[in-house]
Amino acid sequence: MPRIQVVPLLEIVRETPTTMTYRFRADLGGQPGQFLMVWIPRYDELPMALSYLGAVKGITVRDYGDATHALAVFNAGDRIGVRGPYGNVFRLDGQSVLAVGGGSGMASMIAAIEAFAQQGARVVTTVGAKTAEELLFVDRANGAGQVHIATDDGSRGFHGFAPALADKLLDRDPVGQIITCGPERMMYAVVDLARKRGIPVQASLERYMKCGIGICDACVLDDKLVCWDGPIFTGDQLEGSEDFGHFRRDKSGRRIPV
Amino acid sequence: MRIAKGPPKAFSRPAGSVPRMVDLRTEIAGVALRNPTMLASGFLDETGGSMARVYQAGAGAVVTKSVGPVPREGYPNPTIVEVDAGLLNAVGLPNPGIIEYEREVKRAQAAGAVIIGSVYGKDAEEYAAVAAKMSRYGVQAIELNLSCPHAKGLGTEIAQDESAVRDFTRAVKDVVDVPVFPKLSPNVQDIATFAVAAEEGGADGIVAVNTLKAMAITPELKIPSLANKYGGLSGPALRPIGVRAVYDICERVHIPVIGVGGVGSGRDALEYIMAGASAVQIGTAIISRGLGVFNEITKEMAFLLEEAGFRSVPEAIGVAHA
C-alpha cells in the first residue's frame, strides 16, 4: 500500500488574487484528470487535482476555507503530505475538443488541455470566471490552442456564463467532444448542451472526501464514488443521475442541495 | 457458468466453475446468508446506493455505517493512513443520524440487500432508541458498535466495561424483534469474558473484532499522522488477533460468532470459520481487491472446502477446536 510522502514546496506561484500554485517533487505518477490527497499539516487533508504532471508536480488551489487559507501563507521549503494519484483520467480521444472551464475548475483540466494539444488534437478552451482577474491558466490554454474568455461581470470577454459562450461557439465551430470542470451547475449546463447536440462529454466532479481510496463513502454520487469511479464521468454516466447538479453529501452523509 | 478469475495458484485445478458439491450458504441466528461474506461496518455503507452496489457485487449481507441518534460529522482529515500491513482510521463515526438514514436503508433494500443495521449511542437508552428505529426500517439484524468513543465512561469504550456490554445488549434486546449482535473490541485483556457478558444480556450472536487501537507518526513533521492522533488498525495485521479472539470466544459462548479482522482471501476466511465463526466480515481488503473481493473470496472458500472434504460451510465451523 502506498504511504503518504512528505515533500517540501519548491515554488509557490500566485495565479489570481485567490488562487496559488504549489510545485513539489514527489515519487508518484499522475495522468490528466487525476488527483492527490494533500495533507496540510495540522489543518486538513483535501483532494486536489494535479495541475502540473511530470517531474515537478503542481497543485493549484483556491483559498476558500481554513485549510487552504493556512496553505496560502506557506513558503518554499515548508512541507506538505501527498498521496495518490487517485481517480480515473480524461480519455484523450478525437481530433477536436472544446474544454469548458469555470473558476478553479481549470486546474483539473489544464493538464488534459495540454495533452490533447500534444497529441495533435485541435483544442478550443473557454475560460470562465467571476471577474477578469480571477481567470485561471489563460496563457497555458493559449499555448494549447484557441481561447475564449467569459466573465460573470463582463470585465473581460463574453459577459455571462461559460456554457452560454460554449453554446455560441459550437454553433459556428463543431467539435468532436467536450470536457468540462467548474462549479457543478455550470457543468450541469455543459453536459445538458452536449447531450442536446449529441457531442460526447466528460465532466470532472468534486465532492467532499475523507479517504480518497474508495472505502469511506463520503464522496458518493448516486451509487458511484467520485474518488474511485471518477472524478471524471461521461455524459452517458450522468444521464438520469439523481444527484448530479442537484445534491451532494455533507460531512455527516446528509444529502443536501449542491 | 464462467468465472472471471480462477482459483489461487496454490490450489490450482483445471479451469472451471465453483464446486457444485460445496454449499456456501450459512445462517446466523436465523438470518440466512447466500454466502458467508459480509461487508464490515464503516466501508461503503453510509449511503443506500453504495450498500446496494456491494450486495450486488456478491456480499452475503451488508452492515451499515454505525448510526446514532443525530447527525455527526466525524473527525477532521486525515482520517485514514495506510500502513505496511493494514489501514489505520479515525473517521469518527460520521453518519446522517437515524432519522435521515431511513432513506439509505430503503434504497439498499430496494436492491434486495440483506442488511444488518449498526447502531451506537451515548447510553443504553440511546442505543435502544436508535436500534428500535433501525429495526422498524426492516433490517434483518442489529449490530451494536460498542466502541463509541463518546459513550459512558468518558474516553473509554463501552466494550471495556463488561456490565455495560450486558446492560446495553439487554436494553436493545428489549425493544427489537430481530437478532442482536454486539461487536466487541480487541482492546481488552480477555475478550471472551465480554462475549459471555453479551450472551448474558441476550445477544443472539457476537461480532469480533473491532479495530485495534493504534497510532502512526509522520517523522518528517514530528506529529501523529491522523488528525485524531489515535486510530483503529484493520487489515492483515489484525487477522491473527481476530482469529485468536474468535477462537477464545467460541470456547465460552453458545451463540454464533461473526469473524472480522484482516480477511483478504478465502484462506483467511477459513481461518475464522475453523476458529468457530459462522461468517466473516470484509472491509480493508476492498482497497486491494476491489468490490469483486466478496465473490472471489466465496469462490476461494468453495475450492478450499471441497479440497478439505467439506460439503458445506457449517461442517467446517469450529473444527480447529477438535
Image: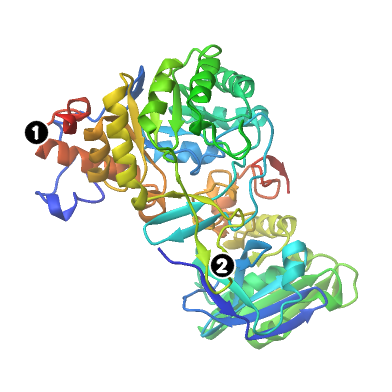
Q: Is residue B313 above or below residue A119?
A: above
The x, y position of residue B10, in whole percent, is: 14, 53
The x, y position of residue B8, in whole percent, is: 19, 52
- Please tell me which residue is depicted at 74% across the width and 55% down the height of the picture: A185
Q: Nearer the viewer, mark 1 or mark 2?
A: 1
Camera-side residue: A121 or A141? A141
Query: Which residue appears farthest toward the front when viewing the image?
Result: B189
Element assignment for label 1: loop
The x, y position of residue A69, in whole percent, is: 77, 68
Mark 1 sits on what residue? B309
**A74 left or right, relative to A47:** right
Quadrant containing the N terminus of chain B in the rendered view:
top left
**A189 left or right, relative to B219:** right
Q: Quadrant of residue B140?
A: top left
Element assignment for label 2: strand
- Please tell me which residue is depicted at 24% across the width and 34% down the height of the picture: B275
- Please tell me which residue is depicted at 47% across the width and 76% down the height of the picture: A28
Q: Is residue B249 visible?
A: yes
Mark 2 sits on what residue? A35
Q: Quadrant of residue B125?
A: top right
- Please tell me which residue is depicted at 67% across the width and 27% down the height of the picture: B99
The amino acid type of the residue labelled 2 equals Phe
